[in-house]
Amino acid sequence: MSARNPGMHLDLEWVSKVKVNTQAVLKRAQQIQGRKVAKKQWQAAWQLKAVTCIDLTTLAGDDTPSNVHRLCMKATQPVRHDLLKSMDMHDKGITTAAVCVYPSRVADAVKSLKAANSSLPVASVATGFPAGQTPLKTRLAEVQMAVEDGATEIDIVINRTLALTGQWTALYDEIRQFREACGDAHMKTILAVGELGTFTNVYKASLVSMMAGSDFIKTSTGKESVNATYPIAIVMVRAIRDYYLKTGHKVGFKPAGGIRTAQESVVWLTLMKEELGDEWLNPHLFRLGASSLLADIERQIYHYVTGRYPAYHELPMA
Ligand SMILES: O=C[C@H](O)COP(=O)(O)O
């Protein structure tokens, strides 16, 4: 991860002046989606880059130590060794960026990665994920518990009630407290954009989250009906750009929820490259939160290497 974002005082004047031009945002999103896609080795290279930015996630009620273990093993060897060897990429240390689990499963993930001699970070969702509708005291205790169990990244959810009712000072104060509870763990702040109503609210919530010291802002929990969309991403990355221009602090971006195809992963990388520049094409400033994206990327890489798509048993870990 890059140098941390220390945050700043809550600048309510800046927040109140925000206005987003919806038509311009939609047009820009369409432009990015319409870009010609790279082919052959260039496409495979982009896809491998995407792999290194994935927070490989499992957030299910039926998570157990064994499926978390399997997730961790997949994260440490995300693409089959022989496929990487064919591309001369087997000795480049390709892993996903992190694994992401519920707080109760952090200790399992830490144990599995330690046993595999891997230093891959464990990220934990927290603060009453996904709805955030538990008392503040409970949400803070959850962050502390995940950190004590070994999570070095915490994905908090914001209190949508405060954002929807324009209580920006209260929202800022809560996020500040989460940042404090995170200690040295990096904090990704989930806005749950599908529940914020307007682009203007998304921009304002992005700004307040960054002012409160978020290291990353993240679109969604994956549990809302609208998750990571390109127009919403444009709004958020422009807030990141404006915040950087004003403060000099670089904040990362994590789209999450419903990202399933290799092709989409390349569009996300294109969006980052065009809107924020090459520095944001790395895991310290860009993550893709996804539970099933890796399977499709590995499948496409298999196709690139062999000229055909794999049968199910040929990529059993995907
Ligand atoms: O933070 C990550 C998301 O929960 C993953 O969502 P997904 O299961 O739709 O990929």
Image (cartoon, rainbow, N blue to C red):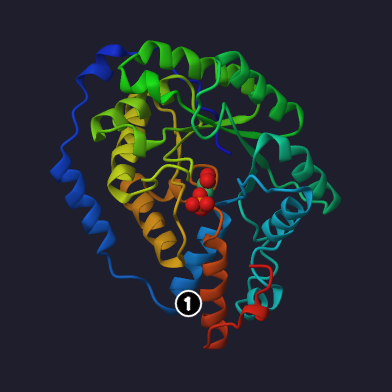
Describe the element under mark 1 as helix, strand or loop: helix
Of residues 42 and 59, the one nearer the viewer is 59
Q: Position of residue 297 (x, y in %)?
A: 52, 68
- Left or right of 114 on screen, residue 181: left
Quadrant where the C terminus is found in the figure: bottom right
Q: At label 1, which amino acid type do we have? A: Gln
Residue at the extreme right: 115
Quarter residue 10 falls in: top left
In the rendered view, tell whether residue 268 sits above or below residue 106.
below
Query: In percent of the image, x 51 and y 21: which residue is there?
Result: 6
How dense is the environment of label 1, judged by Cα within 10 Å: few (below 14), some, or many (20 and up)? few
For mark 1, what is the residue?
41
Tell me the residue at 47%/43% (across/down): 223
Q: Nearer the viewer, residue 97 or 150?
A: 150
Name the residue at 25% across, 52% down: 29
Farthest residue to the front: give it.
62
- Where residue 129 sits in the image (x, y, percent)? 55, 33
